[in-house]
Amino acid sequence: MGVIKAAITGINGWVPEYVLTNEELATMVDTSDEWITTRTGIKGRRILRGNGSGTSSLGVPAVKGLLEKTATDPLDVDMLICATVTPDMQFPATSNIISAKTGLKNAWSYDLNAACSSYIYALTTAAQFIETGKYKKIIVVGADKMSSIVDYTDRATCVIFGDAGTATLLEPTNDGVGIMDTILRTDGNGMAHLHQKAGGSVKPATHQTVDAKEHFIYQEGQAVFKFAVTNMADVSVEIMEKNNIKPEELAYLVPHQANLRIIEATARRMGIEKEQVMINIQRYGNTTSATIPLCLWEWEDKLKKGDNIILSAFGGGFTWGAVYLKWAYDSN
Ligand code: ACO
């Protein structure tokens, strides 16, 4: 085998049934369908309901469906990485829980948190393990129950987020396809603008932190928006130029779905057409670690072997980056 690359060989998504519409949100906070649609592009988002349901409840059906559709024996999976900012609990890792519930008895597993960039960070990490030649089947779960950290009295954040689970299978290839390049960045100074104040080791949960609503997302929307637009566009153009991809040679940009205006600005900077951009933010909102694989899953039957695809994300940290891959299979 020549140079080993890691290829996506299967993808699956799972979303809860309950749709929280803009109209329903307008009965909860001072907002309107018109404001949410024009400022974010979101019309609805899925919410996981039920006591005892957590992020693993989103990841488990996604993994089970992936194993079934790719005819993968759970005992053949070497490793599972769960990309999430909303783990079931502080420990054990949600990946451990998902692995146990899906019969991955021979896999080792851990969680990875890079906020909204978690999926591209996890995909890149998994690819490194495959490229060593030691690992043959790795599952990346991108799942978040964002409703568990959203304050449904805060109109500036509650309209944005939704819940979803996804599972991506990675395997080795020497067929000239797979993950070709990645650029990943971090700037921890961004913490000031986007974080969760309490519940970690700096500020463990107390009555006061709960009363002060410090276990919810804190976001300075406008500041984050400015960094997101600039950095997501810059890194997407950078990976395109580095790999000599002309706009017309790109099959799809798969952007993190945080705000339709950020997506459109990124596409404009890349010089690509609307048809080349995967957008489903209107149906699911920002599902953090699940947005990009949720798009790939919904577009899977349109993808052809060899298609040039760029994944691009920006999130809390700040973290951001882009992945360039050549799609590895025809679905039809
Ligand atoms: N309905 C009606 N009005 C609202 C709402 C709402 N839901 N939310 C805010 N407003 C009001 C504000 O109070 C403000 O009113 P004021 O002018 O009277 O003070 C006005 O609308 C404008 O508020 P902005 O915050 O400036 O609105 P903006 O156009 O920036 O949109 C948004 C807010 C959607 C949050 C946007 O800033 C955004 O998308 N930011 C980036 C989000 C992002 O990319 N996050 C990173 C990933 S998330 C992660 O990593 C976990």
Image (cartoon, helix red, strand yellow):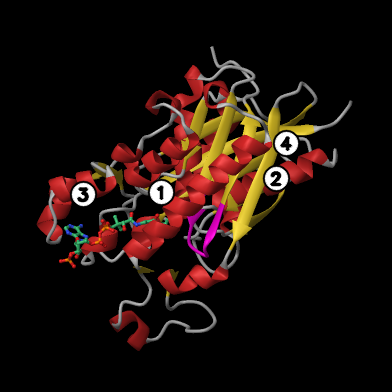
Element at label 4 = loop
Q: Which residues are magenta?
A: 313-320
**Residue 4 vs residue 20, the one in the foreground:** 4
How far is the residue under mark 4 from the one under mark 1? 25 Å
Element at label 2 = helix
Report which residue position mark 1 lands on: 287
In primary-sequence order, the first of circles 4 and 1 is 4
Report which residue position mark 2 lands on: 126
In primary-sequence order, the first of circles 3 and 2 is 3
How far is the residue under mark 4 from the one under mark 2? 9 Å
**Residue 240 vs residue 224, the one in the foreground:** 240
Dots 3 and 4: beta carbons under 8 Å?
A: no
Q: Is residue 285 visible?
A: no
Residue 247: image x %, image y %?
Answer: 53, 27
Instruction: Give the residue type at disc 1.
Output: Thr
Report which residue position mark 4 lands on: 137
Report which residue position mark 3 lands on: 36
Q: Nearer the viewer, mark 4 or mark 1?
A: 1
In primary-sequence order, the first of circles 3 and 1 is 3
